[in-house]
Image (tube, rainbow, N blue to C red):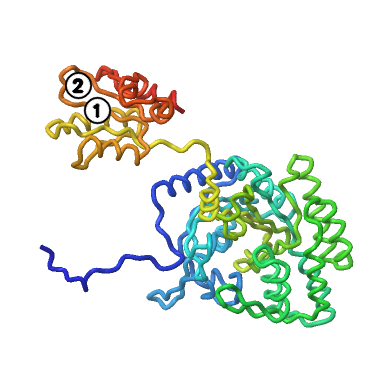
Amino acid sequence: MSNSSSKDIIKPGLPRGLRDLNNLELKLLKNIISKISKVYESYGFEELSTPAFEFSDALGKFLPDQDRPNAGVFSFQDDDEKWLSLRYDLTAPLARYVGENYDKITKPYKRFQVGSVWRNEKPGPGRFREFLQLDADIVGSDNYLADSELIMLACDCMRTLGLDKNNYSIRVSNRKLLDSILELIANNEQIDDARRLIILRAIDKLDRVGVSGVERLLSNGRKDESGDFTKGAELSKASISKILDFLSIDNEDRKKFISQAGSIVNKTVAGQEALKELSEIDLLLAKLDYKEEVLFDSSIVRGLEYYTGTIFEANLQFDSSNDNKFPVIGSIGGGGRYDRLISRFRKDQIGATGFSIGVSRLATILQMAEFQLGEPSNGPVLILKMDTEFDYSYYQIAKELRDEGILAEVYVGSSGMKAQMKYADKKNSPVVIIEGTDEREKGIVTIKNLIKGKEISTSIDSRESWIKNSDIQFEVDRDKLVSKISKLLNSSN
């Protein structure tokens, strides 16, 4: 009898914004990471791994919302009194790595990385405080080709998952367009750094709060459904109107977008530069057949302060009949040019551009949409435990199968055959192997083909027909077991 009282029992639970991942979810994540990593490698990106936390000042003022190293991040003080922070993204650690190893790396430096990042922010649908990112960055290139390549890379990543133009879009803009709008507004009212950030954040929420919500955020502020109030930019009606006109630019035709944006911003240097860069990107993408899935969209902001040029986001969309299942989650990836970030670690300015996929958010949306990345993978072949005194024989079978690269496990519970078969079903086992006393004496084993059983289950009308069906259950010589299982699994793939 336990000596623990009820007061000693800790109630299990997780902090909000965190979650456990089961086997199926982990398989989905691994599948996504494997497919996308192969695309990254095909473009010449090399993998890098950086630590989970950095010196807080290495993250510094380039955190999304505020110029404080502990804003939005989880921080702690080391025993040498230096402040450390869990990485907020994978880009700031890359900038630190490049600054530290600039003379050693091949330039332009193309790296990719997968890893967890942490956000000390309010959780929401599809927004966790710890999640996986998969990044690709090009450091040491300051021209539109690198930006265009990452947009093409984003498209190819979506394609390799089996998505098409009906399921995803890559929406592109340029931070210089926004700079030019703010420059035009600044002719009539003062725009300091704090106000500028409020404006950018307001525009960035267009897909979640709509035009009226953005209008309130640009004015006095907005209260959300939970009752939380967000302070507004307190702009004049004329300035708000100019921003809303900018957001209404046609985003279905790239050339029309460039023309309409030009009528608003072409009197500013920043606007002219943005239009030139977007025109070059459009020309290259069109020639390489990246057309309908890549759109130019004036509402794209990207939340991080360090973007300096081309910016883009990847969004998913599925059949409208499933709309009731989908909360507003936002983009599943994005990136852009950040030419000033690495200069925090060096005196010179190093051109850089990158793309990041939120793997956790992507997996969540694919699960909600019931989107399959190919056929679901099978679990291990299950060897039933029939006679305790012959456990070694079951493990011998499992070892022979594993030696041939076949997943296999022996049932280690204490339940009977019916429960073991239910276990096999829950583990998505393709095959069950039975070696009882009769089989062992005859030098055979019985194989139950669960894959075939599921395929023809609707066409069999009686238990007797099921048992007699030789495609579902049959015997094989023990010494031919491994080759038979191998052929059976290969034929089902």
Q: Which three-letter amino acid code belongs to the residue tagged 2? A: Glu
In the image, residue 73 sits, relative to residue 147, either above or below, namely: below
Residue drawn at 85 percent across, 62 percent down: 272
Q: Crowding at label 1, few (<14), some or many (≥20) Cα neighbours within 10 Å?
A: many
- Secondary element under disc 1, as helix, strand or loop, is strand
Residue that mark 2 sits on: 439
183 or 55, which lies in front? 183
350 or 270, which lies in front? 270
Marked residue nearer the N-terminal end (1 or 2): 1
Count of picture labels: 2
Residue drawn at 12 percent across, 68 percent down: 3
Distance between mark 1 and mark 2 Cα atoms: 8 Å
Q: How far from the left and from the top, in percent, is residue 353?
A: 66, 56
237 or 129, which lies in front? 237
Q: How far from the left and from the top, in percent, is residue 204?
A: 68, 66
- Secondary element under disc 2, as helix, strand or loop, is helix
Q: Are marks 1 and 2 in contact (CB under 8 Å)?
A: yes
**Residue 357 in view:** yes
Which picture quadrant has residue 484?
top left
336 or 99, which lies in front? 336
Residue that mark 1 sits on: 434
Judge left or right: residue 79 versus residue 160.
left
Which picture quadrant has residue 38?
top right
Residue drawn at 55 percent across, 58 percent down: 101
**Residue 348 in view:** no
- Going by the picture, which residue comes out furthest to the front? 461
Judge left or right: residue 161 versus residue 202.
left
Judge left or right: residue 17 versus residue 233.
left
In the image, residue 459 sits, relative to residue 326, either above or below, namely: above
Which picture quadrant has residue 95?
bottom right
